[in-house]
């Protein structure tokens, strides 16, 4: 049995859909999948900040 490699590649492979995203080099969708990401819309500046915080590809503050 092969020992899992450490790092973000293994983390991505452990998450649902992460392996496909890692293989294609695409960004992870906010909300977990593309349908949810398309439905997320901010109505005010506070919600915009929250969506930025939830974005897995956004740099942390």
Image: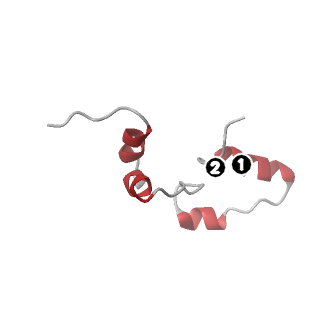
In depth, the one of 20 and 45 nearer the eye is 20
Residue 2: x %, y % from top left? 18, 37
Other-residue count near label 2 (Cα within 10 Å), few / some / many at <14 / 14–19 / ≥20: some
Q: Which residue is mark 1?
A: 52
Q: CA distance from mark 2 to mark 1?
A: 5 Å
Location of the C terminus by quadrant is top right
Identified at 53% across, 54% down, the residue is 28
Identified at 71% across, 48% down, the residue is 52
The dot on residue 55 is 2
The image quarter in which residue 37 lies: bottom right
Residue 43: x %, y % from top left? 82, 60
Instruction: Please say if 16 is above or below 33.
Output: above
Q: Among all residues in the image, which is located at the extreme right?
A: 45
The dot on residue 7 is none
Q: Among all residues in the image, which is located at the extreme front?
A: 25
The image quarter in which residue 10 lies: top left
Identified at 63% across, 67% down, the residue is 38
27 left or right of 18?
right
Q: Evaluate if marks 2 and 1 touch, with contact meaning CB atoms under 8 Å apart.
A: yes
Instruction: Please say if 38 is above or below 52.
Output: below
Q: Secondary structure at mark 2?
A: loop
47 left or right of 16?
right
Residue 41: x %, y % from top left? 73, 63
Location of the N terminus by quadrant is top left
Residue 44: x %, y % from top left? 85, 56
In depth, the one of 44 and 59 nearer the eye is 59
Instruction: Please say if 25 is above or below 58.
Output: below
């Amino acid at each position: 049995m092969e020992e899992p490699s450490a790092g973000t590649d293994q983390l991505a492979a452990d998450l649902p859909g992460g392996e496909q995203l890692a293989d294609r080099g695409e960004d992870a969708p906010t909300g977990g999948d593309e349908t949810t990401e398309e439905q997320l819309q901010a109505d005010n500046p506070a919600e915009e900040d929250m969506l930025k915080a939830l974005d897995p590809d956004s740099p942390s503050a």
